[in-house]
Image (tube, rainbow, N blue to C red):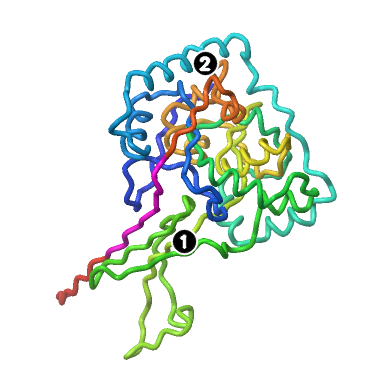
């Protein structure tokens, strides 16, 4: 049982109306319009209606009652699944990583991105069964899923699949727009949902390559904006695995008929460990995901009784960074 869970809510630096899906670096959409695949029936209903209002094309002309009816039918269906598929999340066919991929796993483990992101809980590599991964994210972008499918191809070999799920290369096809909008304000814009504020960092002069100061430099404070590690990763609690990052790639692989994928797996054995490993929405109600009879699973994104495809307007991630300077002369 999970008890005494402390909610973990990291500071948010992004300008957005509601929580976005876990981000991924993906090619530019190959479809003319934008579409979002939404899991109906998952609480709260008001978040679904808010997304429709703010994002769906011609939302003002939509009748809300049929949307609520669809959501209610899916919610009833989930209650049926609690009986017909009780315990399914405990039955995932998760396997050891093929020994032939040990070299690639060692490369990932030695990389700074891995060391920074997976330095807290015990972590390992494995082949996870996609269908039985628990999901907390309620929607994925159909365009990105289709673009990823085109990139990976229908039958990737084991090494290509590993590098696809656990890439080390930096993004090369996701442009970032940077604007100075004030003496102490900058705005960063990017189409990738993986775009984020990293952290403030204290740097030495030699670390700022190319910077020419007008005097001796005592130190440099950097406000770092960029992308996440982009590793497909999950959190294990008992026999259950929750997908933490990589939703679009997982859906793309499953759509191609691939049943298992290389994944970094963190193991949490106590409630407080769960709270630092998962997203805040999971930390707020971990029992629903890790103890209920039938939590939402990745395969639900392919169930016509649950999924709904919504035409949406184009969205761009925008991050504003601003800082203050205060200069004092004090007596000691």
Question: Which quarter of the figure has residue 310?
Answer: top left
| Residue ranking furthest to the right | 100
Are the residues at dot 1 and dot 2 in contact (C-beta closer than 8 Å)? no
Residue sitting at 64 percent across and 60 percent down? Answer: 168
Q: Position of residue 95 (x, y in %)?
A: 77, 35
Q: Nearer the viewer, mark 1 or mark 2?
A: 2
Question: Which quarter of the figure has residue 197?
Answer: bottom left
Q: Main secondary structure of the magenta part?
A: strand
Label 2, on which residue?
78
Q: Position of residue 170 (x, y in %)?
A: 59, 63
Label 1, on which residue?
226
Of the numbered discs 1 and 2, the one sitting upstream in the chain is: 2
Residue sitting at 80 percent across and 49 percent down? Answer: 157
Q: Position of residue 303 (x, y in %)?
A: 59, 24
- Identify the magenta region: 312-322
Give neighbour class at mark 2: few <14, some 14-19, many 20+ (Cα, 10 Å). many
Question: Which quarter of the figure has residue 52?
Answer: top left
Kindly report the distance in space between the C-alpha atoms of the residues bearing marks 1 and 2.
38 Å
Residue sitting at 51 percent across and 39 percent down? Answer: 140
Residue 252 vertical position relative to residue 167 in the rendered view, above or below: above
Asked whether 313 falls inside the magenta stretch, the response is yes
Residue sitting at 57 percent across and 52 percent down? Answer: 230
Asked whether 19 falls inside the magenta stretch, the response is no
- Left or right for 215, reference 238: left
């Amino acid at each position: 049982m999970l008890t005494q869970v402390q909610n973990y809510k990291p500071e948010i630096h992004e300008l957005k109306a509601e929580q976005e899906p876990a981000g991924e670096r993906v090619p530019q959409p190959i479809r003319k319009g934008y579409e979002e695949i939404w899991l109906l029936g998952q609480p709260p209903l008001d978040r679904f209606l808010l997304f429709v209002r703010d994002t769906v094309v011609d939302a003002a002309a939509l009748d809300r009652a049929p949307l609520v009816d669809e959501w209610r039918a899916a919610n009833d269906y989930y209650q049926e699944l609690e009986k017909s598929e009780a315990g399914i999340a405990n039955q995932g066919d998760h396997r050891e990583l093929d020994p032939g991929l040990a070299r690639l796993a060692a490369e990932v483990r030695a990389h700074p991105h891995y060391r920074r992101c997976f330095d807290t809980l015990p972590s390992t590599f494995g082949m996870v069964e996609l269908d039985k991964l628990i999901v907390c994210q309620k929607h994925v972008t159909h365009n990105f899923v289709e673009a990823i499918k085109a990139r990976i191809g229908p039958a990737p070999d084991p090494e290509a699949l590993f590098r696809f799920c656990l890439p080390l290369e930096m993004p090369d096809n996701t442009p970032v727009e940077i604007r100075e909008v004030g003496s102490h304000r900058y705005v960063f814009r990017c189409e990738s949902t993986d775009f984020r504020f990293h952290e403030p960092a204290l740097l030495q002069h030699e670390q700022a390559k190319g910077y020419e100061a007008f005097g001796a430099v005592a130190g440099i404070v950097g406000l770092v904006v960029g992308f996440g590690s982009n590793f497909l990763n999950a959190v294990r609690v008992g026999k259950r695995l929750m997908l933490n990052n990589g939703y679009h790639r997982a859906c793309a692989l499953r759509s191609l008929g691939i049943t298992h994928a290389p994944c970094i797996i963190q193991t949490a054995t106590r409630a407080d460990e769960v709270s630092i490993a998962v997203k805040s929405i999971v930390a707020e109600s971990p029992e629903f995901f890790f103890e209920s009879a039938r939590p939402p699973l990745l395969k639900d994104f392919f169930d016509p009784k649950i999924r709904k495809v919504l035409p949406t307007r184009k969205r761009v991630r925008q991050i504003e960074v601003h800082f203050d300077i205060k200069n004092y002369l004090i007596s000691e």
